[in-house]
Image (spheres, rainbow, N blue to C red):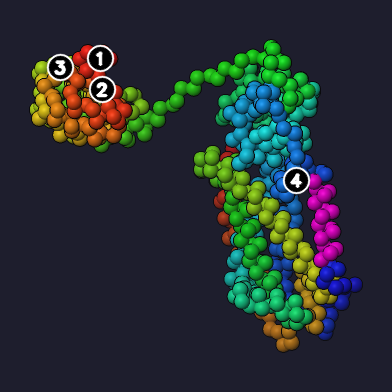
């Protein structure tokens, strides 16, 4: 029902492109897979989900530079004073409209990408002490690899905290402010009333996304070949 | 919905979630309780078998990965409480039940097994160490049972580890003076040698040359002086003319000057050598007092060595 209505161009505006939506939900799935696989000791699965995460994060950085308007860092990265002003205004009941991420959400996106990248990078140097070594784990001393493994675990706890903040914030918009941020991340459209009037969103071509994804995947493939997994 | 109601709901759900996670994961529960200062774990008695025999073993063999700083698989073995709590796969020790204790199972797996502990590359526990753990678990993994209560426990014997010599590193350390050392070894056969096979430091056994070893010969060793850690000039003909050369051996530990023509000048010159531990001189010259005060062992003609 919601999807059908969202397809009506007279009431809804397209704000999120396909690559952003796929990226968002892929990250959700991959984080879950990474968590369960590490927990249960399925390290090969963990390796592949981590490498896919790496490729997606690299793609997202590229898409933040060359992608659609709402995907670009320049669109949602604001100076700290503006973010604080936005949060203060929200507390005071002010309602600002943003087609893409609001200033606080934008900061959260940057923070999540940075933390996820740190998580993937520490993961590349980690080991499980049971014979599994991540692709770069043997490039460094065992002590350094153990430190990376430890850090990998600590950052994961931090990621859980960030996910909690993210979900609480989305819930706040849904239940308190009456703005559903979840559905638009599925079908890509927002109601006219939640988007600034006359907003002009330029959508990048999918071919650009494919090129960026291929480059990112290439790096991930190179990374996996640094480990001894195919002999 | 108002914001306070929403956040109250979030708080309730969060606390409920944490409680469920704590019930499902003892290691997580312990982290939370430790973080909040509420953990009250069991403590082993100081003279117990655990404290005297088991904990030192864990400290020596397991703490690297399962200690205070790192807890792989969320398993810590740094205390009795942590050991009994277990890790993310549940309890590691089942009191009185060796067969079902995961820790025991892991330390008795063949080295070729990926799950064996300590992991591949580390020295496996000895038969005696495994037996100590087995006896402790069999005795209900007690934290209070006195050490004397388990009489048949084997003595823990640590194998002697012979340190591997990094010959590449030794070669690199020797390299700057290697050619000079070789040249002087040819000139003074048997007099110059490396202190040990894993060292770039030198010892001088000039006593082998006797009276033919004079100040000029010692002067020839000038390029090596900062590498010399032991020097025996007993019975040579060196004099106080070599005092500055002796004072330049800044890493010298042991010096023998018995039956030489050295005197007060040489003793004054070596008085400032910080690494010097022992000197043998002819007679008990008053100039040896500063050395004695610094704790350097000074031997004279009548002291013996």
Label located before the other in sequence (4 or 3): 4
Asked if marks 1 and 4 touch (Cβ < 8 Å), the reply is no
Relative to residue A138, is residue A39 drawn left or right?
right
Q: Mark 2 = which residue?
A: B298
| Chain assignment, label 4 | B
Cα distance in 3D space between marks 2 and 1: 9 Å
Q: Main secondary structure of the magenta part?
A: helix
Apparent side of residue B237 relative to residue A71 in the rendered image (left or right): left
Judging depth in this view, the residue of A6 and A147 nearest the camera is A147
Image quadrant occupied by the N terminus of chain B: bottom right
Residue furthest toward the right?
A1
- Seen from this angle, which residue lies furthest bottom? A198
Instruction: Measure the C-alpha gap from mark 2 to mark 4.
Output: 60 Å
Query: Residue A126 falls in which quadrant of the image?
Result: top right
Give residue B38's mark.
4
Proximity of marks 2 and 1: CB atoms separated by less than 8 Å: yes
Disc 2 crowd, CA 10 A, few/some/many (<14, 14-19, 20+) = some
């Amino acid at each position: 029902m919601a999807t059908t209505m969202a397809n009506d161009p007279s009431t809804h505006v397209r704000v999120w492109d396909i690559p952003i939506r796929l990226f968002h939900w892929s990250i959700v799935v991959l984080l879950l897979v990474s968590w369960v696989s590490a927990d249960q000791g399925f390290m090969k699965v963990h390796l592949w989900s981590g490498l896919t995460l790496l490729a997606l994060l690299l793609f997202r950085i590229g898409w933040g530079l060359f992608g659609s308007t709402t995907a670009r860092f320049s669109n949602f990265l604001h100076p700290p004073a503006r973010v604080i002003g936005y949060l203060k205004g929200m507390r005071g009941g002010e309602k600002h409209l943003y087609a893409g991420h609001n200033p606080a959400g934008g900061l959260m996106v940057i923070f999540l990408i940075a933390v996820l990248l740190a998580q993937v990078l520490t993961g590349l140097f980690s080991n499980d002490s049971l014979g599994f070594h991540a692709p770069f784990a043997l490039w460094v001393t065992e002590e350094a690899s153990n430190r990376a493994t430890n850090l990998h675990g600590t950052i994961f706890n931090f990621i859980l905290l960030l996910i909690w903040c993210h979900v609480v914030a989305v819930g706040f918009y849904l239940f308190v402010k009456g703005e559903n941020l979840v559905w638009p991340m599925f079908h890509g459209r927002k109601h006219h009333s939640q988007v600034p009037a006359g907003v002009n969103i330029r959508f990048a071509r999918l071919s650009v996304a494919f090129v960026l994804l291929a480059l990112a995947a290439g790096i991930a493939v190179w990374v996996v070949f640094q480990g001894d997994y195919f002999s | 919905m108002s914001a306070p109601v929403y956040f109250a709901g979030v708080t309730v759900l969060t606390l409920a979630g944490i409680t469920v996670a704590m019930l499902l994961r003892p290691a997580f529960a312990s982290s939370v309780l430790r973080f909040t200062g509420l953990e009250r774990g069991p403590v082993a008695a100081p003279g117990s078998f655990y404290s005297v025999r088991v904990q030192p073993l864990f400290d020596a063999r397991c703490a690297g990965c399962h200690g205070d700083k790192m807890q792989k698989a969320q398993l810590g073995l740094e205390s009795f409480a942590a050991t009994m709590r277990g890790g993310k796969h549940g309890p590691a020790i089942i009191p009185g039940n060796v067969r079902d204790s995961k820790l025991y199972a892991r330390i008795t797996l063949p080295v070729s097994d990926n799950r064996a502990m300590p992991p591949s590359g580390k020295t496996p526990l000895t038969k005696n160490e495994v037996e100590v753990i087995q006896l402790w678990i069999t005795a209900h993994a007690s934290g209070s049972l006195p050490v004397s209560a388990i009489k048949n426990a084997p003595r823990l014997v640590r194998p002697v580890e012979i340190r591997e010599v990094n010959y590449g590193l030794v070669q690199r350390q020797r390299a700057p003076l290697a050619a000079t050392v070789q040249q002087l070894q040819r000139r003074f056969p048997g007099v110059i040698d490396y202190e040990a096979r894993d060292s770039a430091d030198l010892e001088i056994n000039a006593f082998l040359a006797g009276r033919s070893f004079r100040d000029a010969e010692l002067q020839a060793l000038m390029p090596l002086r900062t590498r010399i850690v032991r020097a025996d000039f007993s019975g040579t003909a060196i004099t106080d003319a070599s005092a500055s050369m002796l004072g330049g051996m800044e890493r010298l530990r042991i010096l023998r000057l018995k039956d030489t023509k050295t005197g007060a000048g040489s003793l004054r010159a070596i008085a400032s050598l910080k690494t010097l531990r022992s000197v043998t001189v002819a007679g008990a010259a008053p100039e040896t007092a500063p050395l004695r005060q610094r704790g350097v062992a000074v031997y004279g003609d009548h002291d013996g060595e």
